[in-house]
Amino acid sequence: MNFPDADADLLATATRLLAEAHTPGRHEVAAAMRGADGRIHTGVHVEGSARRTSICAEGIALGSAITAGARDITTIVAVHYKPADRLRVIAPCGVCRDLMFDYCPDAHVYVYEPPAGELPDGTMPGGGWEPGTALRLPVSDLMPYKTRRRW
């Protein structure tokens, strides 16, 4: 996977957390986000038996950052792994995009872009990283025309 050197520590932190916490079907995503002060805040996906009770890694990392006093998040990355797949950077879901837009609209988030002409099919065996590129995009690009809430 092609990933910029400037945020390699963020990717390494999320990957290390996922390696420590990974449980198939329960904890398959980890996220790391950097505050303006350089501190990294993390979270792991918590799967509930009723889908609505599940909490994404990005939301947990954001809550951790807020609890630690971080107010300015600059960069976010989430990684995903299932045993039948390879490790990959994943884009935030719609709920997480909404949270990011509300709490850190000026941040950048990484999303996965497969190699030209290929789409990941989720059946690639083996370890390592999914081929492709991690793109760094402004959070605002993920939610064009979003209604802003005045707090």
Image (spheres, grey):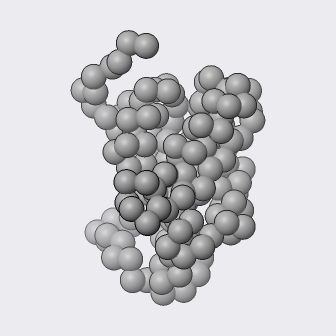
Among the 4 quarters of the image, the one containing residue 102: top left
Horizontal side, residue 20 vs residue 105: left or right: right
Q: Nearer the viewer, residue 120 or 62?
A: 62
Residue 124 image position (x, y, % from top left): 43, 83
Residue drawn at x 71%, y 41% is 40
Residue drawn at x 57%, y 45% is 60
Residue 57 image position (x, y, % from top left): 54, 51
Q: Nearer the viewer, residue 107 or 23?
A: 23
Horizontal side, residue 87 vs residue 21: left or right: left
Q: Quadrant of the C terminus?
A: top left
Horizontal side, residue 133 vs residue 114: left or right: right
Residue 7 visible in image: no
Q: Quadrant of the N terminus?
A: bottom right
Residue drawn at x 47%, y 62% is 48
Residue 40 visible in image: yes
Among the 4 quarters of the image, the one containing residue 18: bottom right
Residue drawn at x 32%, y 71% is 118
